[in-house]
Image: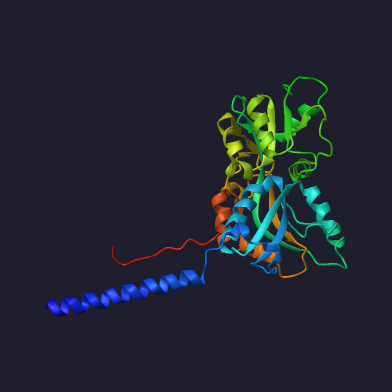
Amino acid sequence: MIKRGFKVFSYVLAIATLSSVFVECKKKEEPIVNQEEIDFTKIEETPVSGYTKILVDESIYPIVNDVNTMYMYEYNRSKIDLLKMSTNEALLLLFNDSVRVAVLPRELTDSEVKRFEGRVTPKMTHFATDAIVFVANKTYTDSIIDYDLVLKNMKSTTTDGSNGTILVFDNANSNVVETFKEKTKVTDLPKDKAYYAGDSEAVIEYVSKNPRAIGVIGQNWLTQPSEKVAKYMGDIKVLGVKNYEDGKYYKASQNNIAEGTYPLTRKLYVVDIQGMSGLGVGYASYIAGYKGQRIVLKSGLVPFKVPPRELNVRDKI
């Protein structure tokens, strides 16, 4: 019995020793690489490796950044730098071939697509839908907004009804302003009652400190607030918006956006003019694929394709 036990122990010891040697060998064969020391510009660009820059409309930066972080984690031979700016600024860089991938809250128009004729055919990948939302100071008397009435009051030469209300946007060249004008059929905003804070974070900060200001921003900054924005979330509130088709007011929830009852929505796209199978293709495939769509869903935006829920069904408990 003792001899048998000793034999078993010997076998276990031998296996453990061999395993230890094997692990040590593997460590020598696969040294730990510090990602910061890699020069990604020298790696051949493919859909899952190399280096590129992606232009991002500032109003949807949080979701793009989240997906990019996960993408680079999974494909650790890739490096993507995100450049935050307005849609108009991003388009100028695309037209000039300065950068060839962008994430925008709209697709290219026919006239914009024509500007690439003879060079490349732009690929546009729809991956999510978000909303333009109105935020007010928590002391603001109403919890809903009729933007048509607000605009009429702002344009009025009298002070009756306007109550000194001003609309606060990120910047004059942003897609938020572009979408707002398109949806409300307004060409010019009252210069003395429309204020441009610089970016979405600045809009939220301004509204939190000014009771008569109504901020107009992309929903993404509220569903995924940055550290700076989080400080002001307790001082603001999101207003319900009037849908002129049924006369009711709706908040920008995932359900209301998906059903189309919330009136101010916009589709988000990855625009790729690389003309090759590079990181633009890889990022677009990832954000529109199963993993990317789950990130979009958790972010509070509406994914292009809702990921299926996997359920394990058992006959017995």
Check the image and name the residue furthest to the left: 1
Residue 304 appears in the rendering: no
Q: Position of residue 143 (x, y in %)?
A: 60, 31
Q: Position of residue 177 (x, y in %)?
A: 76, 41
Taking the spot 70% from the left edge, 37% from the top edge, the residue there is 216
Q: Position of residue 154 (x, y in %)?
A: 78, 27
The answer to which quarter of the image holds residue 272 is: bottom right
Above or below residue 183? Residue 309 is below
Q: Nearer the viewer, residue 317 or 270?
A: 270
225 horizontally vs 55: left or right: left
Above or below residue 207? Residue 287 is below
The answer to which quarter of the image holds residue 191 is: top right
Above or below residue 30? Residue 157 is above
Q: Position of residue 224 (x, y in %)?
A: 58, 44
Quadrant of the snapshot with the C terminus? bottom left
194 horizontally vs 265: left or right: right
Quadrant of the snapshot with the N terminus? bottom left
Q: Nearer the viewer, residue 232 or 185?
A: 232
Q: Nearer the viewer, residue 67 or 189?
A: 67
Taking the spot 80% from the left edge, 43% from the top edge, the residue there is 173
Total label count? 0
Taking the spot 82% from the left edge, 54% from the top edge, the residue there is 93
